Image (cartoon, coloured by chain):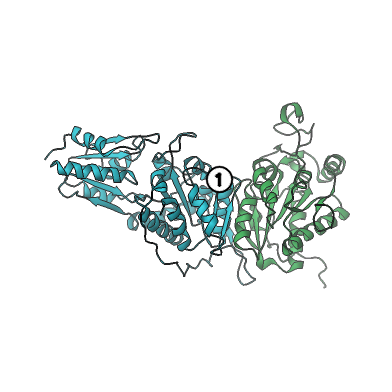
Amino acid sequence: MAVVFERPKALCDVPLHYCPGCTHGIVHRLVAEVIDEMGIEGDTIGICPVGCSVMAYNYFNCDMIEAPHGRAPAVATGVKRTNPDKFVFTYQGDGDLAAIGTAETVHAATRGENIVVIFINNTIYGMTGGQMAPTTIPGQVTQTTPYGRDPELAGYPVRVCEMLSTLTGTALAQRVAVDSVPHIRETKAAIKKAFENQRDKKGFSIVEVLSTCPTNWGMTPLKALERLREEMIPYYPLGVYKDSTAGGKD
Amino acid sequence: MKGNEALAEAAMRAGCKCFFGYPITPQTELAAYMAKRMQKNGGVFLQAESEIAAINMVLGAASTGVRAMTSSSSPGISLKSEGISYLAGSDLPCVIINVERGGPGLGGIQPSQADYWQATKGLGHGDFHLLVYAPASVQEMVDMVVKAFDKADEYRMPALILADGLLGQMMEPVAFPEIKAEMPDKSSWATNGHKNKREHHIINSLYLTPDELEKTVLDRYERYAVIKENETDAETYLTEDADIVVCAFGATARVVKSAVNDARDQGIKVGMFRPKTLWPYPNKEIKKACENASKVLSVEMNMGQMVDDIKLALNCEKPVEFFGRTGGVIPTPAEVLAKIKAMGGNN
């Protein structure tokens, strides 16, 4: 019988620990497919964050490093600067990338570090049980915003792609989502472009993936996808915020 | 050559391929020297956005098997402690230099040894040790940097050079070793791309199963036991017949040596013991040095942080007194001599 759909080579043959309906699995798969298609697994080093994807080192078949919370872009910088011919990517959640690791993220982009950052934005801290993230939307109920996020008290969310698109060192800043098949295909194309940018030494590429957290949102997986579409995309519009390879303004 | 620059030159000769740092007084010349020379030597110099980022860049570079280094001064080392704990927990070799200044807090920018406890007991969370070297001259800084890289690689752990602003700013003649040509083989664990020729490597300090985590710590402590046995180093000076042994490390030992010479001139039987490794502490060596002494004195540029280690090494069998200045004040030979005399040092 012909196999028409199989596990990408760059993913290990192990069960993932993610909750049912979590979209991490989709994004892991897309990253792995891109690594396979480009034939770069043997030359790739991945950096995991602290957060739900902390154990991604068990899931990707390339060499992997587990970084302290928020520090993945600094660790990636150390790897890439000493191994400029290798592919280096970080895989980070919103708390890791846009709260505790904001400085590392902004400055890796500022320097134009030639790395790929996969940024999972699900508007919540998943691993620790559902606290407010820097991307939590006003009004959103979390464990630490039990009455809904009130900007008067808890400030406003950060829009990462918009912020990073102002930096000269950023080559690509694109926001995508994994709520539907067309969007998943777009996500894969963005991830591939980011890795191609690194191959072509274009600089810092970030792909922000709007994702779900059914467990901590208290929703079914389907309802969670609906929330992504109805609440997240209007607040975090999809699109290319910067693409220095497109010939547009820098 | 200036101490800080000598540290940088020695590191490059030891095969250090990358330096990640953040400006802080009084170690700035080190980074400036690296900026001037590292790239020309085919290495990487990068000024990071913070001490935290710098130590994590070291973590990334060290993961791929290259010799990596960072340097800072006291407040900056505190910021690096998170990364140092991760480096230790991931069994990664690297060299960290602390050109100490006064503390706590922002403290001051004058020489100090007030990070002894931090260096030897608490440079980050968790059960772990660093190799800690305490040079007392510019030449020794050079020799110890080279040794620190070798030993860090040998035992797969971070090594720290605990210097101070006095040594960093001091100028002395110095002889450098040849450039190290051969590097240790790290291919059994380095994450530098598997080239489809081996299983993937993982650099990690996370173990969610207590038994598994305990095992990694116990394995590390087995290595520490070997280090305690083999890697202690110390200098003794006129201790054979000494009634009082004065203990001092780093630049303070130079002041103490002058005081000891002055005391000897006055017929007082006094000697000096200088630990060159602060972890592991040279317990056997100090025991031997104090064999014939009735009293021990510790002189430090802090409030007496080494005293407990001396007492433990001597099983509290001899009284250990303390004299020190802190906050950036350097003790004078006359002050130390006065203390020796006050302790009843006589012939």
- Measured along the vertical axis of the image, is residue B260 above or below residue A156? below
Which of the 4 image quadrants contains residue A247?
Answer: bottom right
| Picture residue at 44% right of the left edge, 59% below the top | B10
- The answer to which quarter of the image holds residue B152 is bottom left
For disc 1, the chain is B
In this view of the protein, which residue sits in the foreground, B172 or B284? B172
Q: Helix, strand, or loop for circle 1?
A: helix
Q: Position of residue B198 (x, y in %)?
A: 60, 70
Quadrant assignment, res B222:
bottom left
Q: Is residue B215 visible?
A: no
Q: Is residue B10 above or below residue A151?
A: below
Say what amino acid the circle numbered 1 marks.
Glu
Task: Give residue A153's position: percent from left, percent from top.
Answer: 72, 27
Q: Considering the image in quadrants, where does the N terminus of chain B appear?
A: bottom left
Q: Residue at x 47, y 51 (%)?
A: B96
Q: Is residue B208 left or right of residue B305?
A: right
Query: Image point 29% across, 46% down: which residue?
Result: B254
Near mark 1 (Cα within 10 A), the count class, few <14, some 14-19 or many ≥20, is many
Whether residue A114 is visible, yes or no, is yes
Residue A124 pos. (x, y %): 73, 40
Chain drawn in cyan: B
Q: Which chain shows up in green?
A: A
Of residue A196 and residue B282, the one placed in the foreground of this image is: A196
Residue of label 1: B51
**Could you tell me which quadrant the C terminus of chain B lies in?**
top left
The image shows residue B200, relative to residue B273, as above or below, that is below
Percent x, y of residue B16: 50, 60
- Left or right of B24: which side holds B291? left
Left or right: B198 in relation to B269: right
